[in-house]
Image: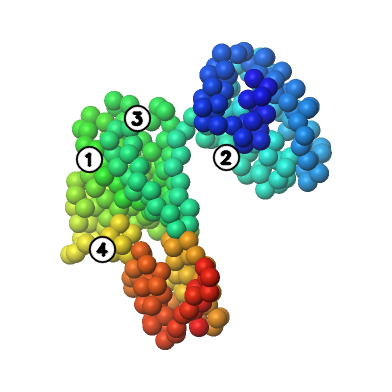
Amino acid sequence: MKDYIRKYRNNEITPTELTQLRQKLNDISDSELSKYLDADWETADIDGSLADKDSLAEIKSSILRATSPDHHHVRLRAKMLRYAAIILIAVLSGATIYFYSESQKQLPNDTVISTGKGESACVNLPDGTKVTLFYESVLSYGDDNFTKDRRGVRFEGDGYFEVHADKESPFVIDSKGLSVTVLGTTFSLSARQCNEAAELYLEKGCVSLYSSLTDEKVTMNPNERASLNYKTGKITVEQMSEIPYTLHNGFLSFNKTPLSKVVETLEANFGCEIEVDNASLLSKTFSGTLPAKDPYEALEVLSLSFNSSFRKAKNTYIIY
């Protein structure tokens, strides 16, 4: 058990060992777990020079109280995650306090699929639903999120959903400020907090879009696009005469977007760096679409729009 805990703390544990650790946690008592964690705390070789010693001592005390036999309501997996978070606090100081607070909400038995800059991924969910994740997107769900009465995931980013039809079990997507409920349908969803609004384009089927800020709820039909304003919570729906440009069909769309923001989006989508030599251009806006699969094509369109040129130096594109 000591070796498992050490490997978990040092992020050296393998997937097989993590499964074995979870089983061991389920088989031991809270008091035994408390002893193991306390022993590891005392013997671990951790550089705590960046952390405030008084705060660290108080955090340690809180962990030990949380893992005492009097706190049977605390799940063992949650305790292990809290402990790992505290180890990180000793190493990374204040920046990790945010991770510590967030770790209370998401347990390690959650399945989390995420993409980074320039990445995309296709995911098949337990019910047969298929999701395509585009750059810097996160999809997560717990072991108990797929039942005969309800299916549910959490999502942030850009994705294309092909939801498996099940009339008895609604499929619910939760994101900050909004919730999408469907039975079986196909749609594109963009839900990024860095944008002014979330957008959903419905290809087929029927969806219900809910705003948690205003309690507004709208039902969408095929070929409609809905926009939910993050500040006001207001939902607007428009009928589309043709399929809009989305990441799913290979385009990035912008509407009066400052060039600085356009550049950030291109960097995230292509996983590259872009510099603009003429700083005065950064505040100018761009409206239109750019190819999402080839950086050269995207930068050709963009540079022409600003009467500029571009060149590449290693992994950096320079607009001049």
Q: CA distance from mark 1 to mark 3?
A: 15 Å
- Compared with 304, 5 (above or below) is above
In the depicted view, which residue is nearer to us: 214 or 320?
320
Mark 3 residue element: loop
Asked if marks 4 and 3 touch (Cβ < 8 Å), the reply is no
170 vs 87, left or right, is left
Asked if marks 2 and 4 touch (Cβ < 8 Å), the reply is no
* Amino acid type assigned to the residue bearing label 4 in the image: Pro
* Marked residue nearer the N-terminal end (1 or 3): 3
Numbered mark located on residue 146 in the image: 3
In the depicted view, which residue is nearer to us: 251 or 204?
251
* Amino acid type assigned to the residue bearing label 3 in the image: Phe
Image spot of residue 311 (x, y percent):
48, 79
* Amino acid type assigned to the residue bearing label 1 in the image: Gly
Asked if marks 1 and 4 touch (Cβ < 8 Å), the reply is no
Which residue is tagged 4?
Answer: 244
Q: Quadrant of the N terminus?
A: top right
Q: CA distance from mark 4 to mark 3?
A: 31 Å
172 vs 231, left or right, is left
Which residue is tagged 2?
Answer: 102
* Marked residue nearer the N-terminal end (1 or 4): 1
Q: CA distance from mark 3 to mark 2?
A: 23 Å
- Label 3 crowding class (10 Å Cα cut-off): few <14, some 14-19, many 20+? some
**For residue 168, what is the image quadrant?**
top left
In the depicted view, which residue is nearer to us: 18 or 31?
18
Numbered mark located on residue 184 in the image: 1
Residue 64 seen: no
Q: CA distance from mark 1 to mark 4?
A: 21 Å
* Marked residue nearer the N-terminal end (4 or 3): 3
Mark 2 residue element: helix
